[in-house]
Image (cartoon, rainbow, N blue to C red):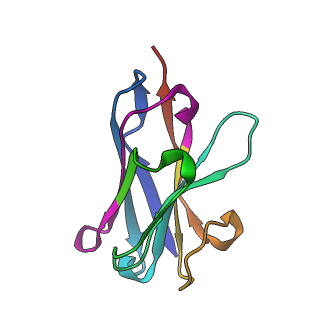
Amino acid sequence: QVQLVESGGGLVQPGGSLKLSCAASGRTFSEFQMAWFRQAPGKERDFVISISRSGGNTYYADSVKGRFTISRDNPKNTVYLQMNSLKPEDTAVYYCAATSRRWATRSVSEFDYWGQGTQVTVSS
């Protein structure tokens, strides 16, 4: 089992920045590919960004390329999401997720562990 706890959400103006953190506990953190998903009201949960177990590879949704960055600190069992140039359409609940699958994946169904989510609201 892996427990994931997100933090860092909040209200930010358009063009602003926010950094989310996800702290993991349970099994060895470096065994897991980590990702962030988001879900806006009335919409499906969508892939945002992911990072490989070593941190050497990252994958982005087109909508966040050039604006969002993912990183991980394996000794601290934490993954981060740095969000810059935020837009109102980035407003959603952001979820941290983990999978032990060894191939890069963007599928909700292939992630085994989820955090409770943290709200990000981009509004003036």
Q: For the view shown, which residue lies furthest in the top direction?
A: 124
First to last magenta residue range: 71-93
Q: Between 58 and 4, which is closer to the camera in this rendering?
A: 58
Instruction: Tell me, yes or no, whether the highlighted magenta stretch contains residue 6.
Output: no
Image height check: is 86 above or below 77?
Answer: above
How many numbered callouts? 0
Locate residue 69, reporting x and y percent. 37, 53
Locate residue 119, reporting x and y percent. 51, 36
Is residue 87 left or right of 40 when viewed as pictured? left
Instruction: Tell me, yes or no, whether the highlighted magenta stretch contains residue 90.
Output: yes
Image height check: is 76 above or below 81?
Answer: below
Locate residue 104, reporting x and y percent. 55, 76
Residue at 53% x, 26% y: name it: 88
Quadrant that contains the C terminus: top left
Residue at 38% x, 76% y: name it: 29
Locate residue 49, reporting x and y percent. 49, 58
Residue at 53% x, 86% y: name it: 102
